[in-house]
Image (cartoon, helix red, strand yellow):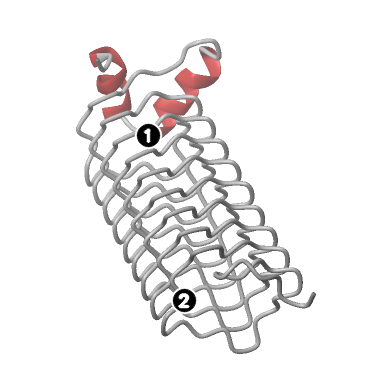
Amino acid sequence: MANFEQIALLQKGVEEWNDWRIQNLAVRPDLSGANLSGISLEFVNFSRANLADANLEGSDLRNANLRNACLDRANLRLADLIEANLQEALLQQTCLQGADLYKTVLCGANFDGANLSQAIVRRANLEKASLKAIDGSKADFLQANLMRTRFDLANLQNANFEGSNLIEACLDGANLLDANLRKANLCRASLLEANLQGASLQGALLKGTVLADGSVAGG
């Protein structure tokens, strides 16, 4: 349950909120279930905050600090998260449909079961992140760092991975129907039982990759 005093403080503005965070380092903010949609939260300090089930649809979270925050089941549809820090954040079953995650730091974040359909994830850093069973249809991962990222059973139909780093990534059982994997680095990645029908692998690096049939490319 959200702390109403903390919500009232946040409504006074990001500057006042961030000052309060500095003075109360031991406090973990509780904004769970709060309606924060459409408000400007640029540069806000939400590190370690509990934002589970919060409504942040369309919010401006550019350059926000959400490191180690809990955003499970939150609504971040069409939110602007450009260059935000969500390292080690929890985003299980979170809605990020159409959200802008350009150059966002997402290392080690957990997106299991989340909706990232049509999300912009260009040049973001998702190293060692977990995106198991996500809906990533039509998501744009252009030149993203997806090294050792988990995409087990993910729906990645029509997703764009052109030029992305998928070294040692796991895409076992993923749906990559009509996906763009041109010039992606898939060395030592696993595509076991993945659906690659219509996918483009032109110029992709596949040395040591476990292919859909279990064979290993390049040896």
Q: Which mark is residue 71?
A: 1
Q: Quadrant of residue 123?
A: bottom right
Q: Residue 6: x, y in percent?
A: 31, 17
Q: Is residue 163 or residue 34 the one in the foreground?
A: 163
From the viewer's perspective, is the residue at label 1 or at label 2 nearer?
A: 2
Q: Residue 19: x, y in percent?
A: 49, 23
Q: Quadrant of residue 187?
A: bottom right
Which quadrant is the N terminus positioned in? top left
Q: Separation of disc 1 and disc 2 at Cα?
A: 32 Å
Question: Which residue is found at the position 76% from the left and 74% from the top?
Answer: 207
- The residue tagged with tag 2: helix, strand or loop? loop
Q: Which residue is mark 2?
A: 196
Q: Residue 204: x, y in percent?
A: 65, 81
Horizontal side of residue 208 vs 42, given as left or right: right
Q: Is residue 34 above or below residue 178?
A: above
Q: Is residue 99 or residue 65 the one in the foreground?
A: 99
Mark 1 or mark 2: name the one nearer the start of the chain. Answer: 1
- The residue tagged with tag 1: helix, strand or loop? loop
Q: Residue 127: x, y in percent?
A: 63, 51
Question: Which residue is found at the position 66% from the left and 63% from the top?
Answer: 189
- The mark total stands at 2
Question: Which residue is found at the position 62% from the left and 61% from the top?
Answer: 190
Q: Which mark is residue 191?
A: none
Q: Is residue 205 or residue 78 the one in the foreground?
A: 205
The residue lying furthest to the right in this view is 219
Q: Is residue 68 above or below residue 130?
A: above
Q: Are marks 1 and 2 in contact (CB under 8 Å)?
A: no
Mark 1 surroundings within 10 Å by alpha-carbon count, few (fewer than 14), some (14 through 19), many (20 or more): many
Horizontal side of residue 97 vs 209, given as left or right: left
Question: Which residue is found at the position 45% from the left and 34% from the top?
Answer: 90
